[in-house]
């Protein structure tokens, strides 16, 4: 699992959200954004990520911390995203990911 988490980190830092979705999300992944359902399966997540990938022109993302305990990874990133209107958004986000068979079956994103 450690290799998969490291590969995922590299893709996040490169802003490859659709690739992450295709490689790492289980078909029935449950995704939460600050406690609210973001997606209830990989297809729904993919459709949401298409919007993100087409509206963000510059991804500047850096891993702040990584912790793996059992089948759960906790990743904290500094995000600086510039959209197609040249507006930049900076924030810190924590991702709690539950893994099964090298796929993420649940991910909770928390704004910090």
Image (tube, grey):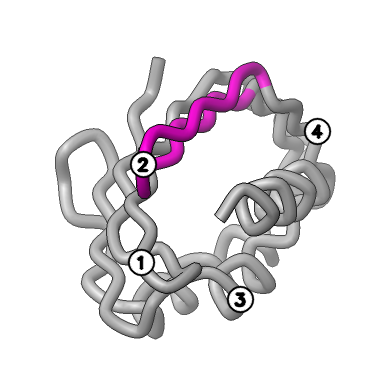
Q: Tell which circle, 3 or 4, labels the residue nearer the N-terminal end.
A: 3
Q: Nearer the viewer, mark 2 or mark 1?
A: 2
Mark 1 nearby-residue class (10 Å; few <14, some 14–19, many ≥20): few
Q: Is residue 46 left or right of residue 105?
A: right
Q: How far across and how far down the image is residue 85, in percent?
A: 75, 44
**Mark 3–mark 1 distance (CA, rounded to whole Å):** 13 Å
Would residue 20 be found to the left or right of residue 46 on screen?
right
Mark 3 or 1 closer to N-term?
3
Q: CA distance from mark 2 to mark 1?
A: 11 Å
Taking the image as shown, residue 74 lies to the left or right of residue 16, namely left
Q: Disc 1 marks which residue? A: 100
Q: Nearer the viewer, residue 74 or 13?
A: 74
Mark 2 or mark 1: whose residue is earlier in sequence: 2
Q: Nearer the viewer, residue 86 or 39?
A: 39
Nearer the camera: disc 3 or disc 1: 1
Q: Residue at x 30, y 70 (%)?
A: 29
Report x, y in % for residue 75.
52, 31
Residue ID for mark 2: 70
């Amino acid at each position: 699992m450690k290799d998969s988490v490291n590969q995922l980190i590299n893709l996040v830092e490169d802003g490859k959200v659709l690739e992450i979705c295709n490689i790492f999300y289980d078909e029935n992944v449950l995704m939460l954004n600050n406690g609210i359902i973001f997606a209830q399966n990989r297809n729904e997540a993919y459709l949401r990520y298409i919007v993100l990938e087409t509206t963000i022109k510059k991804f500047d993302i850096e891993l702040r911390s990584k912790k793996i305990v059992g089948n759960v990874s906790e990743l904290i990133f500094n995000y600086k995203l510039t959209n197609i209107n040249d507006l930049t958004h900076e924030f810190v986000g924590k991702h709690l990911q539950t893994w099964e068979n090298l796929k993420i079956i649940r991910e909770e994103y928390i704004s910090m």
